[in-house]
Each structure stands twice: as C-alpha cells, then as structure tokens.
Amino acid sequence: MTSNQLNNLQIETATRLTGLAYIPRWIGGVLCYVAFGLGGLLSSITILPILRFWPGQKQQRIARVQKAVHKMFKGFVWMLTSTGVIKVTTKNIQALTDAKGVIVIANHPTLVDVVVLISLMPNAGCIVKNTLWRNPFIRGVLASAGYIPNRRAELLLQDCQQVLDSDTNLIIFPEGTRTVAGQKTNPFARGAANIAIRTKKNIIPVTLRIDVAGLTKQQPWYDIPRQTMNMSVEIGAAFDHLMYDTNQSSEAKLARVLTRDLEQYYQQQLFALVPSNDLVKVK
C-alpha cells in the first residue's frame, strides 16, 4: 500500500462532521485560537517580562522564558486535542528532547506546525518574520524568548550563531511557508543549509505527516477541519555538518548540495509508510 492509499483510507474511516454536529467542533477550535491570542497578549505583559528580568545571566533568563513558552504551547496543543481539532503522535522523540544547539528543520503542512514543535522542545528558538514583531499579541513573547528577527543576512547569521552556541535549538522551515495543497513540499530555500554550513552545526530533520488536509495556507485560521487531523512527528537521523567540508568546496556550493540532499530526504520520507506501532500518542 502506498502512502497516498494509506492517507485515503484514513480519510475514509475518519469521522467527518457535518451540519449541527460540526458546530461544537468549530466553536471549540475558534475558542482555542482566541485563548491562544489572548494568552500571548497577557503573558507578554505579565509573566514573561518577569521571567526575562528575574535575576540571573542573560541566557538563564531567556531559557526560563523559552521553557514557559514551551509549556504554554503544550497547553495550546492540549486544547486543540481536547476539542478534536488535532491528535499528535511522535516517533523517536527522545532525539529531539535531548537535542542541544542544533538546527531543527521540518516540512510545513499546517498552521500549527511551529506550535507543535515548540510544545515538544523546552529549548527552542525561531527565525520570525519582521511583520510578526509588529503584532501586539505576540511581540512581547518573541522578544522575551530571544527569538531572531529575519533581517540582513550577516546580522541574521550572527544571531543564529549566538543562539546555537548557547545550546538553544533553532527551528527552521526550509519551505519558507506552508506547503501548497496537493504537494508533498514546496521547493526548499537554502537558508537552513547556509546557516548549518556557516555555523558548523548539525541538522535534525523532522517529518510532519497529516492524514487530513487542514489549516493550510489556502484556508483561513477559523476554517476548522471537519475531521480530526492526525499529525505524526517523526525525528530522523541528523545531517552532520562535517559531511559538508568547506575545505573541499565553497560554502555556497555546499549549501546547494545540502539543500538538494534535504529535499530528497523529505520526498523519500513523505512517500514512505510508517508502522503505527512506532508512534507514541502525545498526552
């Protein structure tokens, strides 16, 4: 059975809510996002600034905030699970839990991918679009957690080096935006590979699989899926930066090679089947 056949089977057997039966799901899903937005706003002006400025070294303060964000995102995933919007299972999660100072990349099928990843990682940082830094609901969260604004290349690289050297993991989506519906992945940008080559850090690939299309780029956030989205989070073997030796070729060429290897890896993974007994439900 191919991956597509498996997905079709899961979609056929899952409960698709229609009519009045869908209303509780829709209300529950929308309330989750409202709670998430209000929680981000309130925490950015209350608990997170307190954690950030509590006595201690700078990295200790940032680590406290990152752990708090991790717990808040874990709570959000719990709410989405409780309302039937999503169900998360994991494979080889210990490799992600134990990771320090590495680049974590993932494909990007849904709106909640970064939330799910951070809910599984207490020491995670992100590169965030400049537009989000002007969002009053989450600007305080981003600043307190030491996340990185997407600015000029040389400044961005310096920020990434500093974050990775502090044993914080850096989450990057090589697709740059959510996957176009009907595609396995969008074409990969070379940003993650460039950062890995230049900072000399390993890459841990995370494959996100969903059996029901939902929360895609083509859908507004309030278009709550009528079927529970089963998302599996699968952690693969690390791409060692030592395999891309800058003494053998230029950094730019190696970044192109690494990007090609990452794309091929995800194309292979997303067409592969995963035995269900390898997956662990996230509680």
Image (tube, rainbow, N blue to C red):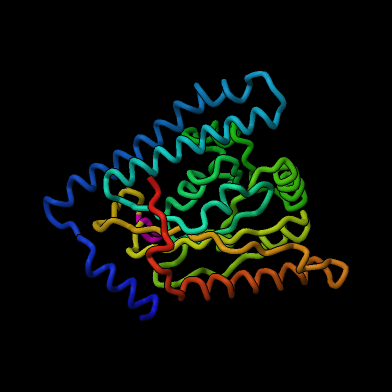
Q: Is residue 114 above or below residue 76?
A: below
Image quadrant where one finds the N terminus: bottom left
Quadrant hosting residue 55: top right
Helix, strand or loop for the magenta stretch, by majority: loop
Q: Position of residue 174 (x, y in %)?
A: 59, 61
* Residue in front for this viewpoint, 37 or 119: 119
Q: Position of residue 99 (x, y in %)?
A: 63, 49
Question: Vertically, is 13 above or below 56?
Answer: below
Residue with the most extreme right position: 247
Farthest top residue in view = 55
User: Residue at 67% across / 29% down in the picture?
Assistant: 60
**Residue 118, image x, y percentages:** 51, 45
Residue 282 percent across, percent down from the top left: 40, 49
Decide if residue 268 is on the left or right side of residue 10. Answer: right
Residue drawn at 64 percent across, 44 percent down: 149
Indicate the quadrant containing the C terminus: top left, top right, bottom left or bottom right. top left
Look at the image and give the residue range highlighted in magenta: 215-219
Q: Nearer the viewer, residue 187 or 259?
A: 259
Q: What residue is shown at x 73% (from left), y 53% (from top)?
A: 153
Q: Nearer the viewer, residue 212 or 282?
A: 282
Q: Which residue is depicted at the point 62% across and 65% down?
A: 189
